[in-house]
Amino acid sequence: MNLVVIPKRVDYLDTYIQMGISTFIFGLDKLSINYPTLTISEIKEIKDKYPNIDLFISINKTIYNKDLDYLKNIMNELNNIAIKGILFYDLAILEIYSKNKYHYDLVWHQTHMVTNYNTCNYYYKKKVKYGVVSSEITIEEIKEIQNNTKMKLFVFLIDYSIMAHSRRKLLSNYYISMNKKYDLKDKIISDKNNNYIVKENEDGTCILNGEMLNGTYFINDLKNVNIEYGIINGTNISNELLDALVPMVKDIIDNGSKYSLKDIELLIGNNTGFFNKKTIFKVK
Amino acid sequence: MRKKIELLSPAGDLERLKVTLLYGADAVYIGGRDYSLRANATNFSLEEIKEACLFAHQFNKKVYLTLNIVFHNEDIKGVNSYIKKVVDCGIDAFIVSDPFIIDYIKTNFPKVEVHLSTQNSTTNIDAVKYFKGEKVDRVVLARELSIDEIKEIIDNVDMDIEVFIHGAMCTFYSGRCALSNYLTNRDSNRGGCSQVCRFAFNMENENKLFTMATKDLNAVKYIPKLIDINVRSLKVEGRMRSLYYLATVIGCYRKIIDAYYAKELTSDLICEQEKILSRVANRETSSHYLSKEADYNDQYYTGRQEISNQDFLGLVTSYDKDTKIVTLVERNYFQVGDDVELFTPKGDIYSFKIEKMYNEQLEEIEVARHPEEIIKLEIEGDIVEYSMLRKKVI
């Protein structure tokens, strides 16, 4: 399994490369939600400086008609850069991809929908070679998917999982209701059990789980079924914490002896999300 | 010649299906016992699906089955045989979300239509083109689109387009919300949505609760425009809604659509239907994204604000043309002297003051106070079963 890092900033790439990381994901300016974003020229600079890394670009925003020309230009421009692939949510990307001969691969990244092997196989037939498994399914489901598809899978190991995305400006509207101006900062909301992170930008509002996912307990299970990539998402994590986590997780993936799962647990807790928790949908 | 636009109604069970078709729906969408996003609704058995199709087809109307869960591995086994059984029942279309199902249906049952669910949140021309390439017959667009954006899609892709016009709205993009999974362990994309977007939360450093709940959608003013831009189908939300709600909502939109095609639509008629619709709703309404970016005015900020009313007084079970006696089953309290309206599936409305009323034994009574009580009234008109008595609205 390769460890993939989503760094908060480009200038930290050196650090992670020195830690042995060679696969990274970034978002793209105006086309990504909840990812650190780069411009095309920044992506080009990275690949010029680090030709040996595998760079994936996430284009996961909901695409509107007004975005299509920009999207097509970007997909063409990315074809001139040696990126490894594009993570996509909107099917417009697959449509554009199918009409062009791009050198890069596609990664199916419909956040909550990558939940079964049949649909993985459907997209694989459409030349989508990779998929990012939904964070809302169990380890057994992930294993069953990988055992029944040729698609190469990414699994989030450490992340503030995104729970929902709206086109609405939910924070702005909330502050208007109090005759206050929204200060454009992320906010924490809570119920009696948990905290949640609310982020708003020009594309709408995202809500993230406020308790960090720790999927590192399942690294061996994932390796046993040949999951290709495990992801640490540093988008909403402090640089210091990310710097501490990356070598630990890398060591565990590589069967090293420097760190243990307990070391990671001490830093981020033991929320295993849905890896061991099956959701229900019929209430009896 | 352009096809007349379709009015598409939800139905949670057979009785509601029949009523909504009688009140003017051109087609009805229903859920089966499995694979539907309203897992906790009554939903239809295979026998009921067959009966629904037989009933609808005798009026040249259609029945669509929702198969729009996001599948997990465990859901895959059995779905193919289920689809075949539903096809054998006479279903006209499947509303699907997961694309592997599209492929299966179009390969094995090419005469049955496939409609892409709004669960896919399709928002642009190229995404619709993708599904055209997959032989999808119709795309239900995301509820986040403006009329101009919808028109642009229709003008650029030869695809039947369906648009939501009335009912509850999701706060988040359909399919891009797993709040229910995280907060209540109920899988929103498999029919278990617990409507977390209607909960209230504490906000850091603020005294006021943070809420995200939206008002309902009401597109009554935009029907002419939606017809003009060649939308194929107008969809009403609400497979768990009541008989009275469906009869009223479908009846109102039927009147507006028919009046528009007959070049008889007036602002007075629109206002009248808006007034009726406002009485049947249990939340405030808005046109949301249809004419502008959804904003502050489209949400609630003080927790749940749902109101129920007692407008629905009784459901007609029979009418004796000779004696002019209508028999109805009481739903809410009413009495002699009340101003009421009796509305029929044909769209007729009889307004009157109750002068006399009778119990099941034809004994004169003053008050109907017991739900399910049989009540008889004297009234002359073209009244049929499933007409409904309500408090005077107009």
Image (spheres, coloured by chain):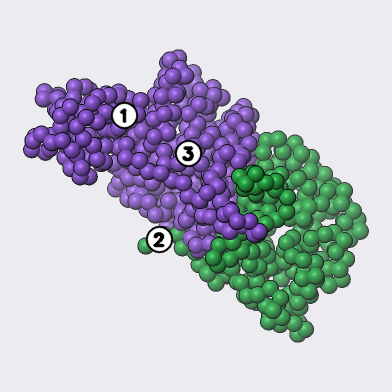
Chain colours: A green, B purple
Residue A276 lies in quadrant:
bottom right
- At mark 3, the secondary structure is loop
Q: Which residue is mark 2?
A: A283
Dot 2: few (<14), some (14–19), or many (≥20) neighbours within 10 Å?
few
Foreground residue among B34 and B249:
B249
What's the residue at 22%, 23% (across, down)?
A: B382
Q: Amino acid at mark 1?
A: Lys
Q: Which residue position holds label 1?
A: B392
Q: Position of residue A120 (x, y in %)?
A: 60, 57
Amino acid type indicated by mark 3: Glu
Q: Quadrant of residue B53?
A: top left
Is disc 3 surrounded by few (<14), some (14 to 19) or many (20+) residues within 10 Å? some
Q: Subunit of mark 1?
A: B
Q: Are marks 3 and 1 on the same chain?
A: yes
> From the viewer's perspective, is residue B240 above or below residue A213?
above
Query: Residue B157 at x, y = what percent?
Result: 61, 31
Q: B19 left or right of A162?
A: left
Name which residue lies at 36% across and 38% down: B245
Q: Label 2 is placed on what type of residue?
A: Val
Q: Which residue is mark 3?
A: B284
The reply to whether discs 3 and 1 touch (Cβ–Cβ < 8 Å) is no
Percent x, y of residue B19 = 31, 36
